[in-house]
Amino acid sequence: MSSLSIAWLLIVCSVANAADVADGARAVNSSFNATDLWGRVVSLLNERNGTVTKEHLEKALGVQLHTAVTDPDATVYRLFETKVVPFTVTLIVYNEQFRSRAPAENGPHINWSVDWPAPSGGDNDKTNCITAARARADLLGSGWSSPWSSWGAAESRPPPQSSSFQSGEPGDLGNPGPPVLAPFFNFFRQSDEATGHRDRLPRGRLFSTGDLADSCVTGITMTAAL
C-alpha cells in the first residue's frame, strides 16, 4: 500500500465523520472530558518521543482498536467515534517494506491520530475546549515547537478554492473535489525546528477551529519512529 492510498483511506474516514456532524448524528457523551483526553495525548507525546504501540495507545486512551486494513507494508488500526467513545483513534504501523517520497518515512515507523468534537457552540463555547493557547503552552513546555508562529495569520487569508470536475467532461462522476479539512498546524521537536530539520521524526500536526489563541483544538496526528 502506498502512502497515497493510506492517506486516501484516512480522508474517506474523515469525510464520514464530517457527514455525521452535518447530519446532527455526532452526539457527544455528557461525560466526555476534552481536558482529560488532551492530558493523555500530551503524555503519549512525551513518554516515548511520540512513539506508541497498539497496546500502549489502547491502555493510555482506554479504548480497543480494531484492524481496519492489512497490507504487506502497513497495518491500519482504527476506532470510530460512538456515543460512548466520542472521539476517533487511528494507528498505522508501517514495516520495513514501506517506501515513501519522504526519506524519514521509509521503512518502519508509525502514524497515530486522535480526533474529538469541537464544542457545539463554536469558538464562543469554551466548555470542553482545549484552546490553541493551552495546547501551545503544553507543547512548548514539553520540548516541542509552537504550531502557531503568530495568532490570526491564517484567519486573514482567503479560503482555499477546491477543484471539481466540470459536468460533461469524460469520466465525470460528479466528484465535488477534495474534502475541506479543518485548519492544521505543524509542530516538531524544538531542536529540529531550530536547526531546520523539519523532515526528521517525530513530527506532529494539530487540527483546530482556527488559529486564534482561543480557537479550539479538535485533533492531533503524530508520525514517529518505531
Image (spheres, helix red, strand yellow):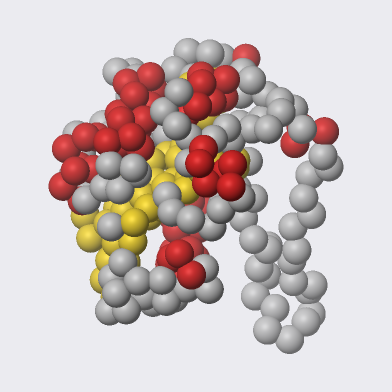
Q: In the depicted view, which residue is nearer to us: 17 or 48?
A: 48
* Residue 221 point in image, percent of width and height: 44, 46
Please tell me how many numbered marks the rendered image carries. 0
Q: Is residue 58 visible?
A: yes
Q: Can residue 81 be seen in this view?
A: no
Residue farthest toward the bottom in the current orientation of the protein: 170
Residue at 16% from the left image edge and 47% from the top image edge = 55
Which quadrant is the N terminus positioned in? bottom left
* Residue 113 point in image, percent of width and height: 39, 46
Q: Tell me the quarter of the picture where residue 30 sits.
A: top left
* Residue 120 point in image, percent of width and height: 52, 23
Left or right placement of residue 90 versus residue 146 in this view: left
- The image shows residue 71, relative to residue 197, as above or below, that is below
Residue at 50% from the left image edge and 27% from the top image edge = 140
Residue at 31% from the left image edge and 53% from the top image edge = 91
- The image shows residue 35, relative to residue 91, as above or below, that is above
Left or right placement of residue 54 versus residue 134 in this view: left
Which quadrant is the C terminus positioned in? bottom left
Residue at 23% from the left image edge and 60% from the top image edge = 67
Q: Tell me the quarter of the picture where residue 216 sits.
A: top right
- The image shows residue 78, relative to residue 205, as above or below, that is below
Q: In the depicted view, which residue is nearer to us: 122 or 97?
A: 97
Q: In the depicted view, which residue is nearer to us: 80 or 225?
A: 225
* Residue 95 point in image, percent of width and height: 28, 70
Left or right placement of residue 181 versus residue 130 in this view: right
